[in-house]
Image (cartoon, rainbow, N blue to C red):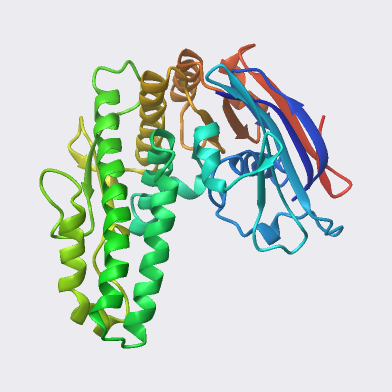
């Protein structure tokens, strides 16, 4: 898969630009604050969700004009080509999506373009709260199961309604039963997709020729009654019903897939990821992204688009060169950023190089 052409209009620091790219790596370099991450963020909006920064759409509009923003792309994959456009009016709290000229829900994007990303904010993934690890897991799962986004939205919506009942001290069991049935169905799908992803990653790491460490992964599903044989909707519904009194005291749902967590161990050392050095934690993250890309290519015949912001941070020269070799071998279009063009020297002529500078208060390709 690839983003063959990209157009930005009044998106953050980019007033207007057009980029045509091949199918291989894209190295974006320039000083801090030049707009490199803004470019990757725009590409990330070609997939469901809030993008790699998890920002609200009202912040995307370029200032001081405040004219609204637009990201458009021609994407290719699976022998098909699609035109994707996402945009928002100035100050709008939501963004619009069009695919091949027709309005579409965001969740549809996951079936058109499969995408994974790694950002500097994820460098603390193994030592901070579980919510970041769930997002990391779900982003990868979305590449394999485009319906994963819909299941996540359905679960979150039903849980918000249940939490409101809990806070309002509603006692009618019929209201709870209806919401818990919806949560159980969507939550079982979430857990099943997460379990399948962990299995896929384990298989993709087995025997892989890579310079990056293998990770042993374990998924804690977030509810004690989760069935041994798989993600069981009935077990989750029973757990939610049994926990109503406790949840009412807390004013929120205390058990379910929204409490899931991912644990990782550096396999060769038997060391938990949280105890590894900063560089080792970065290497584990890169390893998992590469494993997911290999698994996707094995299942679909094509590697996903990868967004790797400041990927060279905490990687020595040897690991950087190894990463570039693996990306090329995968056939992945990887958009990478860095402050110094020398960071991408090992790519040679295998990458499209884009130099970004800040000019007249905005971002420009030079």
Q: Position of residue 254 (x, y in %)?
A: 26, 70
* Residue depicted at x 89% and y 47%: 360
Asked whether 342 or 219 is in front, the reply is 219
Would you place residue 236 above or below residue 144 in this image?
A: below
Q: Which residue is situated farthest in the front direction here?
A: 174
Q: Which residue is situated farthest in the right direction here?
A: 360
Would you place residue 107 above or below residue 180 in this image?
A: above
Would you place residue 313 above or below residue 302 in this image?
A: below
The quadrant in which residue 341 appears is top right
* Residue depicted at x 34% and y 43%: 277
Q: Position of residue 145 (x, y in %)?
A: 39, 37
Q: Position of residue 195 (x, y in %)?
A: 25, 41
65 relative position to 286: left or right:
right
Q: Where's the N terminus, which quadrant?
A: top right
Label count reads 0
Q: Position of residue 315 (x, y in %)?
A: 46, 31
Q: Which residue is situated farthest in the left direction here?
A: 228
């Amino acid at each position: 898969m690839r983003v063959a052409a990209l157009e930005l209009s009044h998106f953050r620091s980019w007033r207007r630009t057009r980029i045509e790219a091949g199918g291989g790596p894209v190295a974006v370099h320039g000083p801090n604050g030049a707009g490199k991450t803004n470019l990757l963020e725009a590409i990330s909006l070609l997939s469901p969700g809030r993008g790699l920064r998890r920002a609200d759409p009202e912040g995307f509009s370029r200032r001081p004009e405040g004219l609204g923003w637009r990201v458009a792309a021609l994407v290719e994959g699976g022998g098909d080509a699609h035109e994707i456009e996402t945009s928002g009016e100035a100050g709008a709290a939501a963004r619009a999506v069009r695919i091949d000229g027709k309005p579409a829900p965001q969740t549809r994007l996951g079936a058109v373009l499969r995408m994974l990303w790694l950002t500097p904010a994820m460098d603390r993934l193994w030592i901070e709260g579980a919510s970041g690890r769930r997002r990391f897991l779900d982003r990868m799962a979305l590449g394999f199961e485009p319906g994963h986004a819909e299941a996540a939205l359905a679960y979150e919506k039903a849980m918000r309604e249940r939490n409101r009942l809990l806070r309002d001290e509603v006692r009618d069991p019929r209201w709870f039963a209806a919401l818990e049935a919806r949560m159980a169905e969507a939550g079982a799908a979430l857990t099943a997709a997460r379990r399948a992803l962990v299995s896929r990653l384990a298989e993709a790491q087995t025997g892989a020729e890579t310079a990056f460490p293998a990770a042993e992964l374990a998924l804690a599903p977030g509810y004690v009654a989760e069935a041994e044989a798989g993600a069981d909707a009935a077990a989750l519904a029973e757990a939610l019903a049994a926990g109503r009194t406790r949840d009412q005291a807390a004013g929120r749902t205390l058990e379910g897939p929204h409490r899931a967590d991912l644990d990782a161990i550096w396999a060769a050392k038997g060391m938990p990821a949280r105890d590894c050095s900063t560089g080792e934690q970065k290497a584990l993250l890169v390893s998992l992204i590469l494993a997911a890309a290999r698994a996707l290519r094995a299942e679909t015949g094509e590697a996903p688009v990868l967004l790797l912001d400041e990927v060279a941070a905490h990687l020595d020269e040897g690991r950087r060169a190894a990463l570039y070799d693996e990306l090329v071998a995968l056939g992945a279009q990887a958009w990478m950023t860095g402050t110094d063009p020398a960071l991408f020297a090992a790519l040679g002529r295998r990458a499209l190089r884009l130099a970004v500078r800040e000019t007249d208060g905005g971002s420009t390709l030079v």
